[in-house]
Image (spheres, helix red, strand yellow):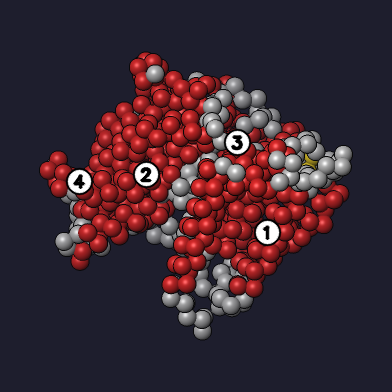
């Protein structure tokens, strides 16, 4: 099992970043609540469509703020070396690009882009073998899903 | 009912599904980083063309197989294939280093089967009576029970309570997106029609557990890491007499696994370690633990398999998942038209009992294939990450798309994968997020329905014995948690 926490001193790290994002997200949700949730009352009292989201987002904002404060007193996991982030980021970006192109180019092309980028991110450089495996994999999944499972892939 | 359910199992596809599920589960569970949750989520598209009984048997077979499979890499490599097999690794790997890896795996297998059979019998005894009681639950009772479930995950799920609370709240907030459960008003849909269906469970699951694993493994990948060496295994056998000598340990571990598994959100890791510690405390030779004690393998394996049946009790009876895996199973049940909850036994009793009986009977193929396969399954650990993880990424896209034939679900899956990567690297636990997502919406619905019924009077939540009982339990849980927190020695401040 990979160790996912490594001490990194008291410098802000990934925990601080995540807590900050959660706090900002919760506050943004509270700010957008009135615009995004319309309420039509007929004079009745009690909980409406905004009440529960308000409590949940408020509690999340408070909890995220507490986590930020608690994080200042202990070591945080470092965000990580840029090349490691680039490997993970490349896979996410490739998948996003594949999804954007899938309606036009089809599932097979999207799967190929995703699979090939993932393989490269894991350091595979035997072009013929590794690309060949990705092509076969994408073909098996595409045609298996379409013809065996009847899933109407793009 | 039991006879009709048994007749439903007399179908070749049921046998094929059971064997396929167990074999796949053993192989997938043996690979570190993959686990039953991911395996079941990725296999859901395969079950769309199947009838409910073989579909659920396939998925539950994967679950059972993967729990044993996790012990293969735990014993042989000291790298647990699943989190719950971390306790097995302590004595299992010590035995493997002495050449007794085969013996450790046999003990793990027999203990797994014992735990599974015990918990299935408890499941059959408890699930339907609980579901019948739950038919009398109104919205006030359901909202208090769900609040109890959410609190248990936060207080006793392990790790930081604040982080577990944050994750539960993230799950609840994610469940808010979509249509309001009472008035039907769109909430946080930003004018998007696909968003009105909200974030579906399966794409979020696939993202959190499969896609995030791909990203984490890519992040942690070391191209120069040496290939794992598997210690040689002497020929071994484990006799019935040797297993009989451990009967008390097996029974106590199965009880712990089953009844802790019933509590929502706890999972199988906590009961595995609880059983290990109890076995060591009861042992006449506690110093042998950590150096290759048979009971050091038997106790956690019986416990982590016993969680299967226990976790299915609240899942099937109340629609409240016991752990992350049963959350996926709950999603799969709903896709098959078997909505868990109080009406499940009334409307689909034959299918449900068929699944229970199959879980019991599948102990036989688990034993057979476990004994045949563990030498073979070891070799899957050697699959290169550069070949394995592209397959997982592509299957994740398929799995997310196939739920509703929608690319929006794939976008949700990718987003959940990125968030899962951030949360896991930050040390936030994922199961509370999942339980918050599943329970948030029904909790809000029950709460508001109760208040609508009472005209806004909150005394409806203390007006029934069931609700009062669970409120008392909530209070007790809070007190116990505060007590243990105050008793814990303070950590030294970081230098």
Q: Is residue B7 above or below residue A103?
A: above
Disc with the residue nearer the chain's start (4 vs 3): 3
Could you tell me if residue B187 is visible in this image?
yes
Label 1 lies in what chain? Answer: A
Q: In the image, which is nearer the foreground, mark 3 or mark 2?
A: 3
Q: Which residue is found at the position 61% from the left and 25% from the top?
A: A151
Q: Position of residue B134 (x, y in %)?
A: 52, 34
Lower position in the chain sequence, tag 3 or tag 2:
3
The answer to whether tags 4 and 3 share a subunit is: yes
Image quadrant assignment for residue B202: top right
Find disc 3 in the rendering and name its residue. B138
Q: Which SS class for mark 3?
A: loop
Where does label 1 land, which residue? A60
Q: Quadrant of residue A78?
A: bottom right
Q: CA distance from mark 4 to mark 3?
A: 42 Å
Question: What residue sits right under mark 4 in the picture?
Answer: B247
Disc 2 designates what residue? Answer: B258
- Helix, strand or loop at label 4? It is helix
Q: Chain of mark 3?
A: B
User: Against A148, is A65 above or below?
Assistant: below
Same chain, labels 3 and 2: yes
Binning the other alpha carbons within 10 Å of mark 3 as few (below 14), some (14 to 19) or many (20 upward) gives some
Which quarter shows the N terminus of chain B?
A: top left
Report the Cα–Cα distance between label 1 and label 3: 28 Å
Report the mark closest to the observer, 1 or 3. Answer: 3
Q: Are marks 1 and 3 on the same chain?
A: no
Q: Dot 1: within a 10 Å radius of its alpha carbon, few (fewer than 14), some, or many (20 or more) residues?
A: many
Mark number displayed over residue B435: none
Mark 1 in CB contact with mark 4 (< 8 angstroms) = no
**Are discs 1 and 3 less than 8 Å apart at CB?**
no
Q: Chain of mark 2?
A: B
């Amino acid at each position: 099992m990979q160790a996912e926490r490594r001490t990194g001193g008291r410098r802000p790290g990934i925990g601080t970043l995540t807590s900050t994002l959660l706090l900002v997200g919760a506050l943004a949700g509270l700010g957008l609540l009135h615009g995004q949730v319309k309420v039509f009352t007929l004079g009745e009292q009690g909980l409406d469509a905004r009440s529960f989201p308000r409590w949940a987002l408020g509690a999340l904002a408070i909890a995220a703020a507490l986590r930020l404060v608690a994080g200042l007193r202990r070591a945080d996991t470092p965000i990580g070396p840029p090349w490691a982030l680039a490997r993970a980021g490349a896979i996410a970006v490739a998948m996003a690009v594949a999804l954007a192109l899938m309606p036009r180019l089809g599932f097979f092309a999207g799967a190929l882009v995703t699979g090939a980028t993932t393989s490269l991110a894991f350091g595979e450089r035997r072009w013929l073998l590794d690309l060949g495996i990705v092509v076969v994999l994408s073909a098996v999944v595409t045609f298996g899903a379409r013809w065996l499972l009847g899933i109407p892939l793009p | 009912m039991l006879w009709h359910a048994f007749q439903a199992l007399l179908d070749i596809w049921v046998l094929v599904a059971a064997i396929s599920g167990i074999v796949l589960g053993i192989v997938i569970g043996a690979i570190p980083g993959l686990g039953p949750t991911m395996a079941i989520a990725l296999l859901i598209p395969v079950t769309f063309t199947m009838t409910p009984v073989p579909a659920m048997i396939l998925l539950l077979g994967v679950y059972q197989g993967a729990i044993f499979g996790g012990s293969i890499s735990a014993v042989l490599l000291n790298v647990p294939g699943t989190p719950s097999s971390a306790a097995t690794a302590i004595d299992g790997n010590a035995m493997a280093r002495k050449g007794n890896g085969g013996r450790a795996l046999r003990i793990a297998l027999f203990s797994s089967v014992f735990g599974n059979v015990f918990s299935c019998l408890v499941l059959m005894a408890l699930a339907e009576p609980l579901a019948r009681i739950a038919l009398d639950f109104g919205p006030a009772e359901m909202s208090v029970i769900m609040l109890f479930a959410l609190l248990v995950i936060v207080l006793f799920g392990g790790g930081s309570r604040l982080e577990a609370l944050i994750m539960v709240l993230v799950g609840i907030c994610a469940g808010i997106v979509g249509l309001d459960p009472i008035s039907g008003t769109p909430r946080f849909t930003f004018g998007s029609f696909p968003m009105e269906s909200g974030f579906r469970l399966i794409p979020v699951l696939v993202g959190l557990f499969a896609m995030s694993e791909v990203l984490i493994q890519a992040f942690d990948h070391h191209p120069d890491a040496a290939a794992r060496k598997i210690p040689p295994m002497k020929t071994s056998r484990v006799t019935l007499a040797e297993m009989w000598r451990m009967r008390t340990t097996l029974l106590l571990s199965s009880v712990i696994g089953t009844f802790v598994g019933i509590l929502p959100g706890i999972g199988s890791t906590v009961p595995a370690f609880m059983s290990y510690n109890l076995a060591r405390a009861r042992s006449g030779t506690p110093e042998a633990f950590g150096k290759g004690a048979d009971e050091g393998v038997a106790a956690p394996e019986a416990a982590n398999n016993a969680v299967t049946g226990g976790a299915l009790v609240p899942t099937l009876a109340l629609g409240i998942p016991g752990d992350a895996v049963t959350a996926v199973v709950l999603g799969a049940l709903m896709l098959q038209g078997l909505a868990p909850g109080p009406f499940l036994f009334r409307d689909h009793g034959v299918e449900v009992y068929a699944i229970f009986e199959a879980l019991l009977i599948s102990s036989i193929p688990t034993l057979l294939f476990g004994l045949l396969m563990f030498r073979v399954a070891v070799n899957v650990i050697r699959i290169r990450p550069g070949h394995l993880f592209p397959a997982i990424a592509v299957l994740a896209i398929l799995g997310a798309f196939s739920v509703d034939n929608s690319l929006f679900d794939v976008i949700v899956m990718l987003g959940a994968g990125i968030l899962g990567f951030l949360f896991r690297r930050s040390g936030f636990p994922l199961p509370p997020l999942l339980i918050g997502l599943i329970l948030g919406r029904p909790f809000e619905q029950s709460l508001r329905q109760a208040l609508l019924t009472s005209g806004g009077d909150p005394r409806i939540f203390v007006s029934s014995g069931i609700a009062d009982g669970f409120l008392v339990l909530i209070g007790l849980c809070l007190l116990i948690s505060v007590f243990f927190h105050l008793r814990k020695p303070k950590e030294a401040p970081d230098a």
